[in-house]
Image (spheres, rainbow, N blue to C red):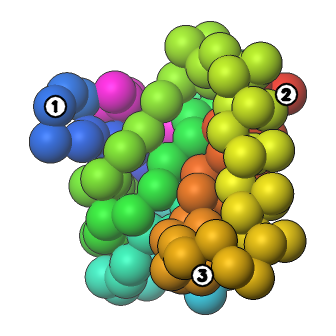
Amino acid sequence: MAESIELEVATPERELVREQVESAQIPAKEGYLGILPGHAPLVGQLGAGCLSYKAAGRNRSLAVAGGFIEVLPDRVRVLADVAERAEEIDVPRAQVALKRATDLMADPNSGVDPAEIKAAVDRANARIAAAEQR
């Protein structure tokens, strides 16, 4: 069995990752997927969360939300609606976004769709989690 798998992470604007990795943990819509070389093929929806991977003995992470995942035995493609490297994340800004979203969630008269509020909370939490892993 191969010792690495190619990981590709891209958004409509840019490619963030294209490298050989030893493993990856990817937030799918229904929970995290642990991916190792030789993983069974699958296609799924990408959730909001911290995508982490190990390459050349170093752990790295990104915040991702929305999109699709394709897993093949030798390659993983993540096509994300939004993605941000941990080192690019402005943590105070993410904390303000989280506070604003949780305040909206607590206000039943906000007039904002609860699904949109939950998505905003999930994105902010993903950004904070990814930044904490750098």
Q: CA distance from mark 3 to mark 2?
A: 27 Å
Q: Nearer the viewer, residue 68 or 94?
A: 94
Where is residue 4? Give x, y as percent.
49, 44
Mark 3: secondary structure = helix
Q: CA distance from mark 2 to mark 1?
A: 25 Å
Badge 1: residue crowd in 10 Å (few <14, some 14–19, many ≥20)? few
Q: Magenta segment range?
A: 16-22
Q: Earlier in the sequence, mark 3 or mark 1?
A: 1
Where is residue 71? Give x, y as percent.
35, 70
Q: Nearer the viewer, residue 124 or 69?
A: 124
Where is residue 117? Give x, y as percent.
60, 68
In the image, which is nearer the foreground, mark 3 or mark 2? Answer: 3
Residue at point 37% right, 82% down?
44
Return the mark for residue 13: 1
- Does the magenta portion include 2? no
Q: Earlier in the sequence, mark 2 or mark 1?
A: 1
Mark 2: secondary structure = helix
Residue at point 16% right, 31% down?
13
Residue indicated by mark 3 = 114
Instruction: Tell me the amino acid under the disc marked 3.
Output: Pro
Residue 4's place in the image compared with 27, above or below, is above
Residue indicated by mark 2 = 132
